[in-house]
Image: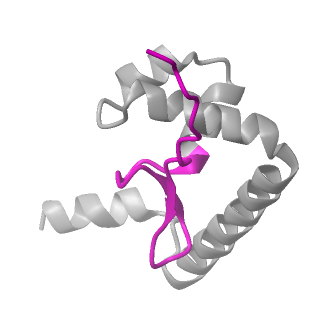
Amino acid sequence: MLLVPIADPIPLGTDANGVIRISKTRVTLDTVVTAFLEGATAEEIKEQYPSLQLWDIYSVIGYYLRHQTEVDEYLLERQRLASDVRQEAERRFNPVGIRDRLLARRNP
């Protein structure tokens, strides 16, 4: 039997909020790429996120290596958005003294 190579689709999808996730899971591209950049192997990522398939992790890492500039730009934009959300939350809900306020509610 002759093996005929075919291209498998990259297991990435964008959700309604513009977040790129892996193969219909809740695991984000950010998560897998960050773990990889921190030195985790595909097998270690699989152990940490059992909803992922090992072949999908390898495919996503390969995609990152082929499209590093674009993915890095996406990750920077996600970090900027997260920072904006954090700043807005801190502006609206002052975190200073929150522990004391929560303990005061608990012990009337």
Quarter of the C terminus within the rendering: bottom left
The quarter holding residue 24 reads bottom left
The residue that appears at 51% across and 31% down in the rendered structure is 57
Please say whether residue 34 is visible from this viewpoint.
no
Q: Looking at the image, what colour scheme do you see?
A: one colour
On the image, the x and y values in percent for residue 22 come to 46, 49
What are the residue bounds of the magenta stretch? 1-30
The quarter holding residue 77 reads bottom right
On the image, the x and y values in percent for residue 97 come to 47, 63
Decide if residue 107 is on the left or right side of residue 102. Answer: left
The residue that appears at 68% across and 32% down in the rendered structure is 62
Quarter of the N terminus within the rendering: top left
Given residues 53 and 31, the one toward you in this image is 53
Is 19 one of the magenta-colored residues? Answer: yes
**Relative to residue 69, is residue 93 depicted above or below?**
below
The residue that appears at 24% across and 64% down in the rendered structure is 104
